[in-house]
Image: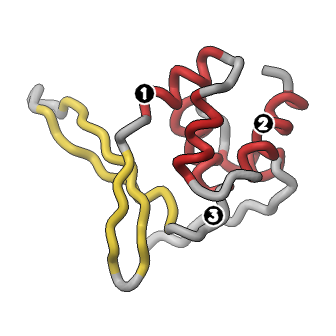
């Protein structure tokens, strides 16, 4: 995918109102790798209310070092957050695109989250 195509896709995704709709756009993408990656993520998100926030998590099951399946949970964003958080996570997790680069494609400034 060319840089200008990537930028156009990121900006198109930002027009959506929530993560499920942005994921649907990704699943319909002409680039088969993007569409397949989005399809594989379907059903792997969960919402939990914590400290008054509705947090969206990605849940995956992977094998640990002992060969046992283990569930991993990663906080992606909160409901109502700018969709750039999901979009940057998607391209980082699935294709190794740095989050900063995705924010830049969207014309936004990336601020790394503080670690607790």
Among numbered discs 3 and 2, the one appearing first in the sequence: 2
Q: Position of residue 72 (x, y in %)?
A: 27, 46
The residues tagged by marks 1 and 2 sit, at their Cα atoms, a distance apart of 19 Å
The residues tagged by marks 1 and 3 sit, at their Cα atoms, a distance apart of 27 Å
The residues tagged by marks 3 and 2 sit, at their Cα atoms, a distance apart of 23 Å
Q: Residue at 63% of width from left, 26% of height from top?
A: 28
Dot 1: element: helix
Viewer-nearest residue: 39 or 75? 39
Residue 69 lies in quadrant? top left
Crowding at dot 3, Cα within 10 Å, few <14 / some 14-19 / many 20+, comes out as few
Callout in the foreground (1, 3): 1
Quadrant location, the N terminus: top right
Q: From this viewpoint, which residue is outermost toward the top? A: 32
Check disc 1 and report the residue beneath it. Answer: 40
Crowding at dot 1, Cα within 10 Å, few <14 / some 14-19 / many 20+, comes out as few
Horizontally, residue 55 falls left or right of residue 63, namely right
Colouring rule applied to residues? secondary structure
Q: Residue at 48% of width from left, 56% of height from top?
A: 76
Quadrant location, the C terminus: bottom left
Q: Are marks 1 and 2 in contact (CB under 8 Å)?
A: no
Q: Are marks 1 and 3 in contact (CB under 8 Å)?
A: no
Q: Position of residue 94 (x, y in %)?
A: 53, 31
Q: Position of residue 66 (x, y in %)?
A: 9, 30
Callout in the foreground (3, 2): 2
Among numbered discs 1 and 3, the one appearing first in the sequence: 1
Check disc 3 and report the residue beneath it. Answer: 112
Q: Is residue 45 above or below residue 7?
A: below
Q: Position of residue 41 (x, y in %)?
A: 43, 34
Viewer-nearest residue: 59 or 63? 59
Check disc 2 and report the residue beneath it. Answer: 9
């Amino acid at each position: 995918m060319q840089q200008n195509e990537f930028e156009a896709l990121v900006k198109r995704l930002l027009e959506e109102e929530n993560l499920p709709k942005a994921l649907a756009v990704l699943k319909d993408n002409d680039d088969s790798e993007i569409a397949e990656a989005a399809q594989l993520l379907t059903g792997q998100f969960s919402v939990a209310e914590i400290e008054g926030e509705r947090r969206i998590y990605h849940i995956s099951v992977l094998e640990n070092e002992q060969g046992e399946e283990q569930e991993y949970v990663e906080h992606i964003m909160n409901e109502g957050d700018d969709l750039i958080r999901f979009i940057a996570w998607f391209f980082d997790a699935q294709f190794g695109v740095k989050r900063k680069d995705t924010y830049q494609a969207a014309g936004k400034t990336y601020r790394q989250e503080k670690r607790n």
